[in-house]
Image (spheres, rainbow, N blue to C red):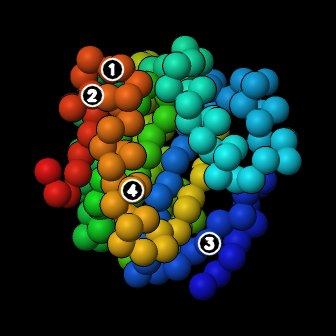
């Protein structure tokens, strides 16, 4: 096990283990989100507050339509290579993904964020950074935790009230 400090969040990097990762569009990181990050709340509570806020926020909302489909296809292209993809949901300003690591976490995230940046920038005819520099990861502890995270990802877009929620979700067990 390697514990890596990247930006503000510590990352646990363990090959052959399941990871739940969330990353957000750069524009979604407003002052409210930064205030939560700076609070003394537990990481779990911070992430809950941030995810709840982002599900309703209009900041950095551009992960829609063809972008969702192309990012899903891109993430699936690394399945069985860098990771084993279990579940994925792409909501308008952030992504949740559950996978079993076959490579170092920093390499997986570099590939996912870099390739999806290219997709977004190409489809929206823009340039520059798409994602906030950091990401939140949580090592899955046991089967119950895996099930809770899988269901959280599965129902996230539905809970957010998105009309195209089913198209935004990929799950290995569906």
Which labelled disc corresponds to residue 12?
Answer: 3
The structure residue drawn at horizontal position 43% and vertical position 46%, both measured from the top left corner, is 96
**Position of residue 84 in the picture relative to residue 135 (left or right):** left
**Position of residue 8 in the picture relative to residue 47 (left or right):** right
The structure residue drawn at horizontal position 27% and vertical position 28%, both measured from the top left corner, is 165
Few, some or many C-alpha atoms within 10 Å of disc 2 (few <14, some 14-19, many ≥20)?
A: some
Q: CA distance from mark 2 to mark 4?
A: 18 Å
Q: CA distance from mark 4 to mark 1?
A: 21 Å
The structure residue drawn at horizontal position 84% and vertical position 41%, both measured from the top left corner, is 38
Tell me the element at label 1.
loop
The residue tagged 4 is 148
Few, some or many C-alpha atoms within 10 Å of disc 3 (few <14, some 14-19, many ≥20)?
A: some
User: Where residue 4 appears, x then y in whole percent?
Assistant: 70, 71
Which labelled disc corresponds to residue 162?
Answer: 1
User: Where residue 50 appears, x then y in whole percent?
Assistant: 63, 35
Q: Nearer the viewer, residue 23 or 114?
A: 23
The residue tagged 2 is 165
Q: Is residue 103 visible?
A: no
- Mark 1 and 3 residues: CB-CB less than 8 Å, in contact? no
Tell me the element at label 2.
helix
Tell me the element at label 4.
helix
Q: Residue furthest left?
A: 174
Question: In the picture, residue 67 is in which quadrant?
Answer: top left
Looking at the image, residue 72 lies above or below residue 143: above
- Mark 1 and 2 residues: CB-CB less than 8 Å, in contact? yes
Q: CA distance from mark 4 to mark 3?
A: 19 Å
Comparing marks 1 and 3, which lies closer to the viewer?
Answer: 1
Q: Nearer the viewer, residue 159 or 19?
A: 159
Looking at the image, residue 133 lies above or below residue 119: below
Q: Earlier in the sequence, mark 4 or mark 3?
A: 3
């Amino acid at each position: 096990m390697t514990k890596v400090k990247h930006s503000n969040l510590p990352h646990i990097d363990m090959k052959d283990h399941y990871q739940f990762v969330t990353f957000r569009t750069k524009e979604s990181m407003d002052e409210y989100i930064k205030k939560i990050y700076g609070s003394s709340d537990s990481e779990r509570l911070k992430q809950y507050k941030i995810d709840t806020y982002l599900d309703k926020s209009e900041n950095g909302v551009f992960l829609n339509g063809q972008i969702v489909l192309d990012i899903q296809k891109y993430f699936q292209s690394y399945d069985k290579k860098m990771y084993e993809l279990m579940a994925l949901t792409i909501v308008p300003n952030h992504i949740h993904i559950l996978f079993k690591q076959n490579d170092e976490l920093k390499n997986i995230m570099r590939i996912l964020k870099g390739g999806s940046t290219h997709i977004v920038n190409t489809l929206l005819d823009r340039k520059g950074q798409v994602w906030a520099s950091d990401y939140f990861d949580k090592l899955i502890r046991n089967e119950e935790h895996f099930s809770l995270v899988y269901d959280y990802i599965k129902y996230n877009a539905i809970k957010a009230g998105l009309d195209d929620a089913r198209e935004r979700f990929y799950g290995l067990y569906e």
